[in-house]
Image (spheres, rainbow, N blue to C red):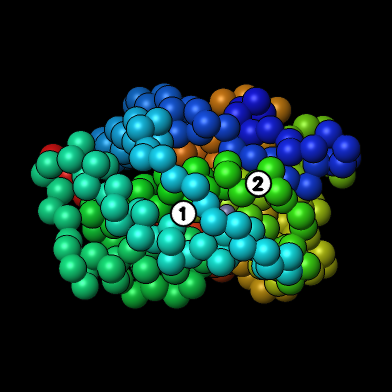
Amino acid sequence: MTPAHTPLSSALTPPAILAPATTLFSTRAARMRALASGHALGDWLAWLARLFEAQQNLAEQLPAFTLPIVSAPQMPLLAAHRATLLARAKEILPRLAQSFPSVAMPTGDELDARLAAGLSRAAAQPDTAPAEACDFIIAAALQVVWADAAHQALPGFRQPTAVPAAACPCCGSAPHASLVYAGEGKDGLRYLECSLCATRWNAIRARCTHCDTGEVVQYFGLEGGSEAVRAEACDTCHSYIKTFFPKHDSQIDPQADDLATLALDVLVGEQGYARSTPNLFLGAGEAVPA
Ligand SMILES: [Zn+2]
Ligand SMILES: [Zn+2]
């Protein structure tokens, strides 16, 4: 897991930010295929594995693209590029969709609305649009474009001054989950992984990423389940975020493993906590397209 993300600078300890590898989507696809085997939602997870593989293929064949440099040191690196990147996602979407001919893709205003809704979901903003299979393909296109842009932009990374700790310093989106890289208790380093561009950034452990308090944080796990996943729940705002521990499973991928552990969401929900983080492939789409 760890080699998939690399620190931008060895001068900082711990590194503030880890850039996603160019093999991000194939690593994620392989993990999802493994998780799908024998899983109660196996058909759905296997379909998502195909989608992640298609993301990798697309990422390797993207048309040449140079990001214009816009200096805004207080903002996330990609904040000023939203419209440009959105247009690029729309441009490459048909290449991704052709791998899934049974899924009806929207056009015109409806497509624009669903693209915008995908970004809203990544920012954890309330979104009333129902999630259909086309939304997952649209989200996948957005991820390919934003992860590619992160690769271009991150070498110039400076910690933005006006971005909350729970927002991606690269693109401003919300994390889908966090990882504790090594060690136990307070010795492990925690990173949040962006739901959109997959950049990881360092975050204080045992501190709620939603309301930014460190008062009472509880950990929930599934009885008899893997020690590699816990829900970190806050008793101040009653929200939770999933935290993964690669020391117990080195193949962890936060996005894939999140979707394969929805039973934990049910358990924590029954305890009265609400999920604070998005996952762009979480929704009403468990009905698998043919
Ligand atoms: Zn991001
Ligand atoms: Zn909280």
Q: Distance between the residues labelled 2 and 1?
A: 23 Å
Residue depicted at 58% across the width and 44% down the height = 152
| Secondary structure of residue under mark 2 | helix
Q: Where is residue 135 in the image (x, y as percent from the top left)?
A: 29, 57
| Residue 200 to residue 241: above or below | above
Q: Which residue is drawn at 29% across and 52% down?
A: 91
Circles 2 and 1: CB atoms closer than 8 Å: no
On the rendered structure, is 164 left or right of 276?
Answer: right
Q: Which amino acid does label 1 sit on?
A: Asn
Q: Which mark is residue 279?
A: 1
Residue 154's disc number: 2
Q: Which amino acid does label 2 sit on?
A: Leu
Q: Is residue 178 visible?
A: no
Instruction: Categorize mark 2 by other alpha carbons within 10 Å: few (<14), some (14-19), many (20+).
Output: some
Which of 225 and 231 lies nearest the eye of the viewer?
231
Is residue 146 toward the left or the right of residue 61 in the image? right
Give the x, y percent position of residue 222. 56, 43
Give the vertical position of 130 relative to 35 (above or below).
below
Residue 189: x and y in percent read 80, 41
Mark closest to the chain's N terminus, 2 or 1: 2
Q: Does the residue labelled 1 lie within 8 Å of ligand 1?
A: no
Q: For numbered disc 1, what is the local secondary structure?
A: loop
For image coordinates 66% across by 29% down, the residue present is: 2
Which quadrant would residue 70 be assigned to in this image?
Answer: bottom right
Foreground of the two, 282 or 70: 70
